Every structure is written in C-alpha cells, then in structure tokens.
Amino acid sequence: MAENTKLSKEKINSNYSGKTDYDLIIIGAGISGMSTALMYLKNTEGKKILIVEKNSYVGGYSTTFRRGGYVFETTQLFPDIIEMIDYLGLDIKLKQYEKDFMRRIVVHGDEVDEYKIPTGAENFTRYLKSKFPDDADKIEKLMSYSISMFSQVRKLKVIPTLKDTLVTPFKAPKVIANLNRTYSGLLDKFDITNPKLREVMETFTSFSGVPSDMASSIYATGAMLSSMTRCFRPYGYFDEFPANMARLFQKRGGELLLNAEVENIVIDEGVAVGVKLKKEGRVIKAAKVITTIDPMVAMRKLVGDENLPAKYVKRLENVVMSASSINIALGLDDDIDLAGMDLDYPYNVVSTGLGTSEKLFDGFIAGDNSFSEDCFHAAVICPSLTTGAKNTITIRCTPFAINKWLEWRENDPEKYKAEKERWADFFINIAEKYFIPGLSKHIVVKNISTPATFARYSGSPTGSIYDMASIVTQFGPKRLPFKTPVKNLYQPKFAHGLYGGMMNGVQMVDMLLNRKFNDGNSLFSPKNK
Ligand SMILES: Cc1cc2nc3c(=O)[nH]c(=O)nc-3n(C[C@H](O)[C@H](O)[C@H](O)COP(=O)(O)OP(=O)(O)OC[C@H]3O[C@@H](n4cnc5c(N)ncnc54)[C@H](O)[C@@H]3O)c2cc1C
C-alpha cells in the first residue's frame, strides 16, 4: 500500500443537508453508531437519519493515524462479525487467522511458559488437554459446558415477551445459573486449581482489563468463543471498516455531520426532541435520539441529572467505567526481520502469573497503575505483517487510570512527556525481552498514546477504552438499559469491542422496530437474511 495515499477515513466527508428535523439522530460515528444507522436503514424505508460526530473522521476508537511516514492502528482483531458484515453488504477484504489465535507467554521470575492458543474451540480443548494431561477431564467438562452455555445465549431474548421470560429458565438454564457468577467462579466450579492452567484460561478476562474474580463468566466465555472461533483483520488498515460503513450509510440516504460536538440532548417535558450542537448553538430536532458515546457524559452532562429520576442518577453514580490504556506505536526500520520472529498472530501477549490482573485492576481503581517489573501485562501486535506496509508494531498496555495523566498534560507538560517516555521504555523493554530481540535499535518513529489521549479523542472523561467495565455486577440485566428514563432517548451499550458495537446496533434497531428485525434475539439472527 502506498504510504502517501489518503487513509480510508479521510475520504469520508459530511453530507449534512442543513435540515432541522429528522426521524432519528445518532450521536457518535463509532461502530455502535454506524451499525445502528445501517441496520435501521436496511429495515425501514424513507427514514431520515443524521449521525452527528465530534471528530473529523468516522470510526471512533477503531481508527488509524499517520506519523512520520508510518500508518498505525488502534484495533487489531475482528471477532466473528462476518454474518453482520455480509448482511449489511459491506465490502471489506479480511484475512482470517486459520491456525493460532494467540501467542501467550507467562513469566514466573526467570521461568517462562509459552503457549500457542489455536483458533477453534475444539482445537483449543485438544491443545489444553495436551498441555495439561492431568487436568484433561476437567478441561473437557469446562469447555463443553462453556460451549453449551454460549449456545444457550443464542436462545435468550433481550426484548422478551411474557412467554419468553417464563420459558427462559428452561431454554437457557446455564445462562440463568451463571448470571451472577464470575469467571473465576466458573473455573472453581470445574475444580480448575492448577495455577498454570488458570493462567491460560484467565487470558480471556484480562482481555477486557478486568480480573477473573470480577469478570462475568458469561461475558468472558462469550469473548473467548466469539474471538477464537473465527478471527480476522483487514488486509488494509482498520479504518476501512468504519469508512465503508459510512460510505454505505451515505449511499443509502443517511446524512453525516462531522466536526460537530453535541453539547446537549434537548429535552422537552421529559421527552428527547433533538440535539444542540456546541458550534453556533444550532438545534437539530428528531423524533428519536440515540447516544453511543460514554454513558456518563451522555446522561450526566448532555441530559443532566436534573432531567433524570433520582434512582437512575444513583445507578449512574455506581457505574464502574472500564480502564484506560497506554499504546506504544513503533515504526521500525527495514533491517528488522519481523517476519522471522513468529509474530503473525492477532495477539502476542505476555504477562506475569496468577494474580496479575487483580493487582493491575486494584491499581486502576485506586486511580493509578500497578505495573512493575514483577507485575505486568502487555500485548504486542504486528500489523505490517498483513498490510505489507513499512514495519510497525503496537504495544498495548491496560489497565491504566486517567487521573494523573490529565493533570500532567494540562499543568505539567514536561512531566507528561517524561512519564510517557518512562512507560514507553518500560514496555518496549518487555516487548524486546519476550518477543522482538534488538527492538530498540530499530525504532524510527515512536508514538505514545496515554489515557489522556484516549480521553481527548473519544470524549470519555475517564479515557475508558471498553465502555462500562465488563464486571459481573454490570452484566446483562444489570447493565444500563438501552431505554433511558427520558422518552425517545436510547443508549445502546450492550457490550464493547467490534462485535459488541455491531450487536449494539442489532439490538437497538430490533427494539425500535418492536422485534420485527431480529425477533428479540440476544445474538444476530435476523428474520430476513
Ligand atoms: C486501543 C484500542 C484497541 C482496541 N482493540 C480492539 C480490537 O482489536 N478488537 C475489538 O473488537 N475491539 C477493540 N477495541 C474496542 C473497540 O474499538 C471499541 O469497543 C469500539 O470501537 C467502540 O465503539 P463505539 O461506537 O461503541 O464507541 P466509540 O468508538 O467511542 O464511538 C463513539 C463516538 O462518539 C463520538 N462522540 C463522543 N462524544 C461526542 C459528542 N458529544 N458529540 C458528538 N460525537 C461524540 C466520538 O468521537 C466517537 O467517534 C479497542 C479499543 C481501543 C481503544
């Protein structure tokens, strides 16, 4: 791919007609916003939809950027969203990772365990049994239970009729039994006590930046199975995906307004009637408003506590937003042989052993971080092996809290820069030690994103990269519902990630259309394919 061509996202422009009244306004042109818009357009006729986005580009957290002649990406893996992409008619060339899903290293002092986690649940089960033969029976039981539980999720209705509610305990007993169970509770249920085996299994909760004793067992199992069953990345850059969505949206008559921050959701006698833009104070009306931005901002700032019932405000106060991250994007010289370093996996992950996620999460909750030489977790991704562009790697490190980063960036730029460099060096050393020998000698361009960077681009004051934290106390019926207490205002934030974002759209549109599209199903199963 030529380096100087425009990125896909840069080719998408506003096509706002200047109308002042719409059937639907969607706030945010991330994956959730655009999935909602496309699913709605496909299942309705003649509706006028406007997406309002504060940034100059579409895609939100799933994006790319250019620095010093290199192109870097935020996201790195498409879980299995192929059915939804095909349904919408999105054209994107994807590379499927056929063999291994992850190269996983666990460090215990000087001892290092390495695993190659294969794609496909059956392969994974076989692999685990070969690595941990003494635990083969337990592994078999855990995995078959997990697969069966995930298949029962398919039978759940998220927009249930009374009959659905009554039959759920019979149709999806494993889901009901696990609604309040943590992932570590699930491992305990199958007597998985071997610490090394637990370390491998907990890979799928540290994914979302939460410890297994807080993560929902259903969510972690779903993340594991939906990611490893079939996983992909674009042959080009990740921004192709949102750009293609935006192009299709505009082609089907949708309107997009970029560089337009929503300052308020306009409420009239308890009903959402439109949005007010920061620029020029322009008000655009709509019969329905959907927000896909950080729920704390949407509800507490754009709506305002004064417009919400006290009970809901209390609920908002108790929501735990997910952690933020430090991402180190490196452009490397041509002398390094990345192809010869066994890095072509969706994820290369290295961490210290059992207890790491708990310590890191505690550090984040305390408003800081707990990374040290003895306690770390990092993912190393190598996109250029697929894109064929100049050598790049990204090192992703979660969880970090935002607190000090904002303060430093605003009041002490030198400290901000020094801390960025300190943490970049720390993680580059880890990547060099476990994955890429000699890495630091090959760095040409270094771009460090901090929690303050994520906050600025996303508009989430906590720089939360995974929306509401996927802990068991905020899962399923305990998560903020799509229907807000304000009439005609909706907030589809069922889950995070590209899969979650696409499903936000599916469930949202199904709700708007009274189940006529997806029959109330929790997973994608449209009535007319
Ligand atoms: C570094 C990183 C790597 C990731 N890697 C992966 C991965 O490999 N695979 C995966 O599945 N997921 C990954 N994720 C998660 C995934 O990218 C997100 O969960 C998903 O993109 C969220 O989409 P969204 O539309 O719900 O929210 P967002 O992407 O946050 O979109 C919300 C949009 O609203 C806009 N907005 C905010 N406030 C306003 C306002 N007031 N007015 C107008 N517009 C506003 C924002 O600018 C943004 O464009 C990653 C996330 C990060 C940060």
Image: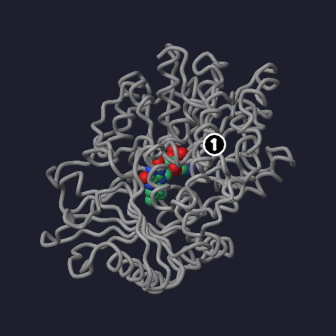
Q: Which residue is mark 1?
A: 145
Any part of residue 30 in sight: no
Q: Quadrant of residue 262?
A: top right
Judge by depth and name the residue closer to the eye, 24 or 190.
190
**Which residue is painted at 30% across and 65% down in the image?**
393
Bin the neighbour count of mark 1 within 10 Å (Cα to Cα): few under 14, some 14-19, many 20 and up. some
What x and y, as percent, mark residue 389? 18, 56
- Is residue 265 or residue 371 the one in the foreground? 371
Front-lying residue, 155 or 133:
133
Q: Residue at x 61, y 77 (%)?
A: 368
Q: Is residue 43 left or right of residue 188?
A: left
Q: Quadrant of residue 244?
A: top left
Residue at point 86% right, 47% down?
Answer: 311
Numbered label tally: 1
Q: Residue 479 location, x and y as percent?
A: 72, 45
Viewer-side residue, 23 vs 163: 163
Q: State whether residue 391 is above or below residue 281.
A: below
